[in-house]
């Protein structure tokens, strides 16, 4: 088994003699065998044990056993006591989930503080089987069917290709003592029911189930690699950066076969779960305006695109108002504007840029008010004779919903003077009779 262990470690590049490895040890047969295998290598390693304080004297006995094992192997020993039930009550999660979260958090913290490169866990082929079926029963994607990898984010699993039968045989051959966790005999947990009932039945139906399952996992892993490469290829083609947003063109998305799966994978990095992704898929042909939120992002279904932006970019829903007196020269917040008064005789050729407003100073009533665009606003766009809804004007400019939210208007006595950066109101334009001009530049 040691030669198979070395081959697995080397073929997956899990570690070298230069590495320092923190080995997680419960005292059970799997982790004890892992320790013994490590002791036959030239790798520097230490043992880390979690006492979850869930089984009274039995938990304390596990701790003492692992401490003695570290002394026998002449390696460093670290232990941490947890109030697991307090975490369960505080977080509202299961005991298994709480124990998993707090142990991995401690392992990573300990490895960082003590200078260990990687953390070794004694997961084996039977754990792979159990994880596969747990994920299958709960519903999963291809990554869930693949189950665990030999290495993930600094966590290595050198026993992943070994069955529990292999491990028990090695322990017997080498006279290795170990601890038994009484909770493993219970059928309270789904994992234990799979271990005690489903897997023995599968082995009864197919005596070669272990190697067949291992081969199938290898195929699934290869398929997953191809799958993710294709997802990334399409992501590069369809997900485009624009300003501070990411855009997905709906028509191009819907031309893809299984576009719902592509969309789920595209949206996963933004924190959208499968349920929300499904809801978004169902409205791709609907009218624009539907909005979806993840913990970190907002997605808006616009006319032709899905617009994704960080929540930090989303403007406040409370309208902001800034009042400007006649002597204002510069404004930097919430947008950057400069104000310049010009006499008629000094008037240069008027720059028609939409980022500059040329206004008749005498027609303005101060203080001016700078505020966000809101539904119901009306103005008379330069060159037109009647007023129109500002919302219609912005729609004709084909502005997206996030861009509309960023529109500011400058008003005088509650009348819009300038839709900032887009168009002034015709009633405040410079005419041949204008003597004093106010030039406002957005930069």
Image (cartoon, grey):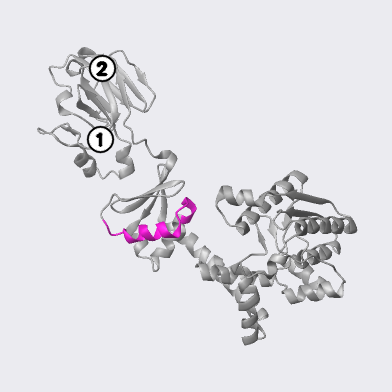
Residue 127 visible, this angle: yes
Q: Is 282 placed left or right of 418 in the picture?
A: right
Q: Is residue 345 above or below residue 234?
A: above
Q: Pointer 1: residues within 10 angstroms few (<14), some, or many (20+)?
A: some
Residue 374 - label: 1
Closer to us: 140 or 263: 140
Question: What residue sits 17% from the left and 23% below the top?
Answer: 428
> What secondary structure characterizes most of the magenta part?
helix
User: CA–CA distance between discs 2 and 1?
Assistant: 20 Å
Rendering quarter of residue 275: bottom left
Q: Is residue 182 left or right of residue 384?
A: right
Q: Secondary structure at mark 2?
A: loop
Q: Which residue is mark 2?
A: 367
| Outermost residue toward the left in this view | 385
Q: Position of residue 95 (x, y in %)?
A: 62, 57
Q: Secondary structure at mark 1?
A: loop
Q: Which residues lie in the magenta part?
A: 268-286
Task: Judge whether 380 appears above or below 394 on screen.
Answer: above
């Amino acid at each position: 088994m040691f030669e198979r262990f070395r081959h697995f470690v080397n073929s997956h590049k899990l570690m070298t003699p230069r590495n320092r490895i923190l080995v997680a040890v419960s005292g059970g047969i799997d982790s004890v065998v892992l320790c013994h295998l490590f002791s036959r290598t030239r790798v520097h390693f230490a043992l880390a044990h979690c006492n979850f304080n869930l089984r009274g004297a039995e938990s304390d006995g596990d701790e003492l056993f692992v401490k003695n094992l570290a002394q026998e192997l002449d390696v460093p020993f670290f232990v941490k006591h947890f109030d697991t039930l307090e975490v369960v009550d505080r977080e509202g999660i299961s005991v298994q989930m709480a124990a998993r979260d707090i142990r991995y958090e401690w392992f990573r913290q300990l490895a960082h503080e003590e200078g260990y490169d990687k953390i070794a866990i004694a997961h084996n082929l039977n754990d792979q089987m159990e994880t596969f079926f747990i994920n299958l029963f709960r519903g999963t994607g291809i990554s869930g069917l693949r189950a665990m990898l030999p290495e993930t984010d600094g966590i290595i699993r050198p026993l992943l290709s070994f069955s529990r039968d292999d491990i028990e045989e090695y322990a017997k051959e080498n006279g290795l003592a170990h601890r038994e966790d009484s909770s493993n005999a219970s059928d309270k947990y789904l994992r234990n029911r799979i271990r005690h009932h489903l897997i023995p039945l599968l082995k009864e139906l197919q005596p070669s189930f272990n190697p067949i399952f291992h081969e199938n996992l290898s195929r699934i892993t290869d398929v997953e690699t191809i799958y993710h490469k294709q997802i990334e290829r399409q992501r590069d083609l369809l997900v485009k950066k624009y300003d501070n947003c990411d855009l997905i063109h709906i028509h191009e998305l819907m031309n893809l076969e299984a576009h719902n799966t592509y969309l789920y994978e595209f949206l996963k990095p933004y924190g959208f779960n499968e349920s929300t992704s499904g809801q978004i898929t169902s409205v791709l042909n609907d009218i624009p305006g539907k909005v979806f939120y993840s913990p970190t992002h907002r997605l808006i279904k616009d006319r032709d695109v899905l617009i994704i932006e960080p929540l930090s970019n989303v403007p406040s829903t409370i309208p902001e108002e800034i009042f400007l007196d006649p002597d204002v020269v510069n404004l930097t917040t919430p947008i950057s504007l400069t104000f310049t008064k010009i006499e008629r005789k000094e008037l240069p050729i008027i720059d028609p840029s939409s980022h500059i407003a040329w206004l008749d100073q005498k027609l303005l009533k101060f203080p001016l008010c700078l505020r966000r665009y809101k539904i119901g606003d009306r103005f008379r766009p330069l060159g037109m004779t009647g007023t129109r809804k500002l919302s219609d004007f912005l729609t004709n400019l084909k502005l997206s919903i996030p861009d509309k939210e960023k529109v500011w208007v400058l008003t005088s006595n509650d009348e819009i003077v300038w839709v900032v950066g887009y168009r002034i109101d015709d009633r405040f334009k410079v005419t041949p009779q204008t003597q004093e001009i106010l030039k406002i530049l957005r930069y």
